[in-house]
Image (cartoon, rainbow, N blue to C red):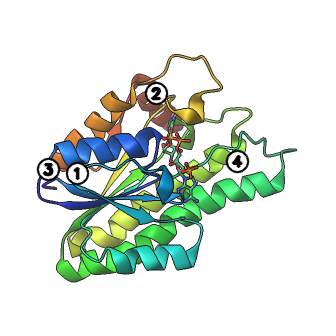
C-alpha cells in the first residue's frame, strides 16, 4: 500500500489511536477523512476532512460512504470496552461491545469495500487486541467482540485479496489512551504502535502484532 497520495478514512478519529492514525497518515502524505460520531470533537488540521460517522448506525455509515467515495484506505479503529463479565455482566453492555467492535467494523467494510473492488485496489486496517486471543476476567464481552473482529479481518482478507483489496490486522495490548486510563499497567505509546502499523501497511504485511504481550497472546492460542 502506497500511503503517500492515498485517501484514507479513520473511524473514531477524534481521540486515542484514531487521532494518532490521522496525524501519522497526514505526515506520511495521505489525505484523511477523520470520522467521528461527534465531529465537533475533531481537531482541524491541514489534509484532514471531518466526517460524521457512528459505526453502529447504518444510515450514518451509508452517508459517510456516499460522502467519501474516493477512499482507498480504511482504518477500522472505533471501539468500546465496557469491562463486562460474560457470566453475570450486563447483557446490554456485552451487546454494545459486539455492535460496535464487530458489527460496526463489518458495516464499515461492507460500505467501503465495493468502491475499492470496483477500482481493483485498496486496503483496510482492522484494529483488534491481544484480548482477541487471551481471556481477561472483567473484559469477557470485549474479548469476545475483539476475537470476532479478528476473524472478520481474516475472512474479509480471504474474500477480497484476489480482487486487489488488502486487509492488515493490527493487534496490540495495553496502550496509553482513554480506554486504558483506569489502569496503571505499563502501556504502549500510541505513536509507537501506530507507526508500527503504518510501516507494516507500507511493507504489504497482513498482520502487525505491536508488542510482546500481543505476540505472546497469539502464540498461546496454538498451545
Ligand atoms: N488502548 C488500548 O489499550 C487498546 C488495546 C487493544 C486494542 N485497542 C483498540 O484500539 C481501538 C481504539 O481504541 P483507543 O484505545 O483509541 O480507545 P479510546 O481512546 O476509548 O477511543 C475510542 C474511539 O472510538 C470511538 N467510537 C466508539 N464508539 C463509536 C461509534 N459507535 N462510532 C464511531 N466511533 C466510535 C470513540 O468516539 P467517542 O469519542 O465519540 O466516544 C473514540 O474516538 C479500539 O478498537 C480498541 O478496541 C485499544
Q: Earlier in the sequence, mark 1 or mark 2?
A: 1
For the residues labelled 3 and 4, the Cα–Cα distance comes to 37 Å
Q: For this view, does 24 lie left or right of residue 127?
A: left
Q: Would you name the residue on which mark 3 appears?
A: 29
User: How far across and how far down the image is residue 18, in percent?
Assistant: 41, 46
The one nearer the camera, 105 or 32, is: 32
When the figure is inspected, residue 139 is found, relative to residue 109, above or below; the finding is above
The one nearer the camera, 141 or 151, is: 141
| Contact between labelled residues 4 and 1, with CB atoms less than 8 Å apart | no
Location of the N terminus by quadrant is bottom left
User: How far across and how far down the image is residue 12, in percent?
Assistant: 47, 52
Q: Secondary structure at mark 4?
A: helix
Q: Residues within 10 Å of mark 3 (few under 14, many from 20)?
A: some
Q: Earlier in the sequence, mark 1 or mark 3?
A: 3
For the residues labelled 4 and 2, the Cα–Cα distance comes to 21 Å
Q: Earlier in the sequence, mark 4 or mark 2?
A: 4
Q: Which mark is residue 46?
A: 1
| Contact between labelled residues 3 and 2, with CB atoms less than 8 Å apart | no
Q: Earlier in the sequence, mark 1 or mark 4?
A: 1
When the figure is inspected, residue 116 is found, relative to residue 47, above or below; the finding is below
Q: Secondary structure at mark 3?
A: loop
Q: Would you name the residue on which mark 4 appears?
A: 141
Q: Would you name the residue on which mark 2 appears?
A: 216
| Contact between labelled residues 2 and 4, with CB atoms less than 8 Å apart | no
When the figure is inspected, residue 101 is found, relative to residue 143, above or below; the finding is below
**Which residue is painted at 24% across and 74% down in the image?**
70
**Which residue is painted at 59% across and 59% down in the image?**
100
For the residues labelled 2 and 3, the Cα–Cα distance comes to 33 Å
Give the mark toward the camera: 1 or 3: 1
Amino acid at each position: 500500500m502506497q500511503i503517500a497520495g492515498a485517501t484514507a478514512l479513520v473511524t473514531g478519529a477524534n481521540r486515542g489511536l484514531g487521532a494518532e492514525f490521522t496525524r501519522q497518515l497526514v505526515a506520511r502524505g495521505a489525505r484523511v477523512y477523520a470520522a467521528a460520531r461527534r465531529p465537533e470533537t475533531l481537531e482541524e488540521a491541514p489534509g484532514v476532512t471531518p466526517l460524521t460517522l457512528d459505526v453502529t448506525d447504518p444510515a450514518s455509515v451509508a452517508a459517510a460512504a456516499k460522502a467519501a467515495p474516493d477512499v482507498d484506505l480504511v482504518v477500522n479503529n472505533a471501539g468500546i470496552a465496557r469491562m463486562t463479565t460474560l457470566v453475570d455482566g450486563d447483557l446490554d453492555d456485552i451487546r454494545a461491545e459486539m455492535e460496535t467492535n464487530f458489527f460496526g467494523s463489518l458495516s464499515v467494510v461492507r460500505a467501503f469495500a465495493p468502491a475499492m473492488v470496483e477500482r481493483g485496489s485498496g486496503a483496510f486496517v482492522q484494529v483488534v487486541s491481544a484480548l482477541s486471543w487471551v481471556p481477561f476476567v472483567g473484559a469477557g464481552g470485549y474479548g469476545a467482540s475483539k476475537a470476532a473482529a479478528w476473524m472478520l479481518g481474516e475472512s474479509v482478507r480471504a474474500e477480497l485479496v484476489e480482487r486487489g483489496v488488502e486487509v492488515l490486522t493490527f493487534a496490540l495490548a495495553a496502550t496509553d489512551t482513554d480506554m486504558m486510563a483506569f489502569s496503571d499497567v505499563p502501556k504502549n505509546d500510541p505513536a509507537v504502535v501506530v507507526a508500527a502499523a503504518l510501516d507494516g501497511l507500507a511493507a504489504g504485511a497482513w498482520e502487525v502484532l505491536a508488542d510482546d504481550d500481543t505476540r505472546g497472546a497469539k502464540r498461546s492460542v496454538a498451545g
